[in-house]
Amino acid sequence: MLSLKDFDYSLPQELIAQEPAKPRDHARLLCLDKNNGGIIHRRFDDLSKILKKGDILVINDSKVFPARLLGHKKETGGRVEVFLHKHKQAFIWECLIGGKVKAGAIIVLGLGLEGRLLADQGDGTWLVSFNFEKEKFWKILERIGRMPLPPYITPNEKQHLDRVRYQTVYAAKKNIGSVAAPTAGLHFTKRLLKQLSALGVLLVPVTLHVGLGTFASVKEDNIIDHKMHSEYVSITKKSAQLLARAKKNRQRIIGVGTTSCRVLESYGQAIKQGKLSLGESYNEWTEIFIYPGYKFELLDSLITNFHLPKSSLLMLVSALAGEREIKEAYKQAIASNYRFYSYGDAMFIG
């Protein structure tokens, strides 16, 4: 049995980062050797010294949208928060709702946008029908929506700051769809990406629209019983061919963040099960849950942040580097005053 308590640790409140490093690529980087547990303390832009020609850097190019909406009940005026999670069909979204509500209630959100609560789905989410969709809906969202910062970060009064810093520099406009940032990617600057490219490191974009599946806490004592929410993943034909060539040439495949890792391993599992061949494009919903004992199919190394206790993300990195090794790395990071979570420092597991 893999016990939930084995993935718990204590973190001083002051180590939870409230803003990113300035500049982004000056965050600290703990380098963990997954083969022997060796630890070296560096800076994030030292990746230009760590990575080498021929390495494949797999990035999640999904773009975060302002998914938090503040409104009130049309009937009573009571305050309600609507957190957009997943687009289901025309006009209808799956949402998290903050406030006391019931089915049929109409929530007034601003600029003419309203949402009617259709049904409580019993898993903490509601189906909500909005009165606008497509271009009109997104235009209103850009004006009244707030960035979906995690609850441990205090939003900046100047909201436009978080719109910039809670977004990777390589997020693709055509791939808008995440309700949380793929945070390991937040450390990259255009300058660092240019350095890595000049070095001969190849950037390969994939997409995972980050939803509840990535950040929902694990509650089951036996973690194997945990059920992930599904998230949409995609690999284009071009990226798939680059991955196939890299695998053939034994080039190192490095995931930027646990989301990129989950795309790669969902793809790897589909190939292993004979559903498609390496080099084919991939578009699917994934519920992959990676925990110790998992055999990685495509991923060799990982760039990642420091994760919350008892989270599926902490279990994923423990699967890659070893439970004991991750516990020691986190112990050293805390002792060395590393900054934790979304805006915090990073790890390189290789």
Image: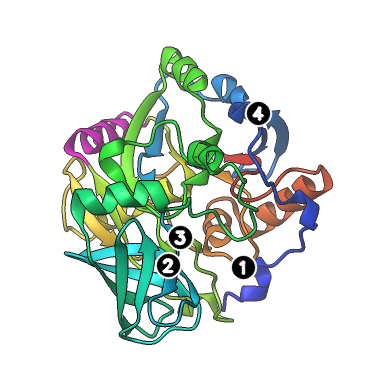
Of mark 1 and mark 4, the one earlier in the sequence is 4
First along the sequence among labels 2 and 3 = 2
Q: Residues within 10 Å of mark 2 (few under 14, many from 20)?
A: many
Q: In the rendering, which numbered label is found on residue 82?
A: 2
Is 80 positioned to the left or the right of 94 in the image?
A: right
Residue at horizontal 29 percent and vertical 76 percent from the top? 116
Q: Is residue 7 left or right of residue 256?
A: right
Residue 1 rendering spot, x and y as whole percentages: 57, 79
In the image, residue 133 lies at what x, y percent?
20, 58
Q: Secondary structure at mark 2?
A: strand
Q: Say which amino acid is labelled 4.
A: Lys
Queried whether the magenta region covers residue 309, the answer comes back as no
Q: Amino acid at mark 1?
A: Lys
Magenta span dominant secondary structure: helix
Residue numbers of the magenta segment: 236-250
- Marks 3 & 4, CB-CB < 8 Å contact: no
Q: Secondary structure at mark 3?
A: helix
Quick one: label 1, few (<14), some, or many (20+) residues within 10 Å?
Answer: many
Horizontal relation, residue 211 to residue 9: left or right? left
- The reply to whether residue 302 is visible in this rendering is no
Q: Which mark is residue 310?
A: 1
| Residue at the disc numbered 3 | 214
Q: Vertical placement of 60 versus 144: above or below? A: above
Residue 72 % position (x, y): 44, 72
Between 175 and 65, the one lying in front of the other is: 65
Residue type at tag 3? Thr
Is disc 1 placed on a helix, strand or loop? loop
The x, y position of residue 318, in whole percent, is 58, 57
Residue position marked by numbered label 4 in the rendering: 22
Would you identify the image quadrant in which residue 346 lies? top right
Looking at marks 2 and 1 on the same chain, the residue that comes earlier in the sequence is marked by 2
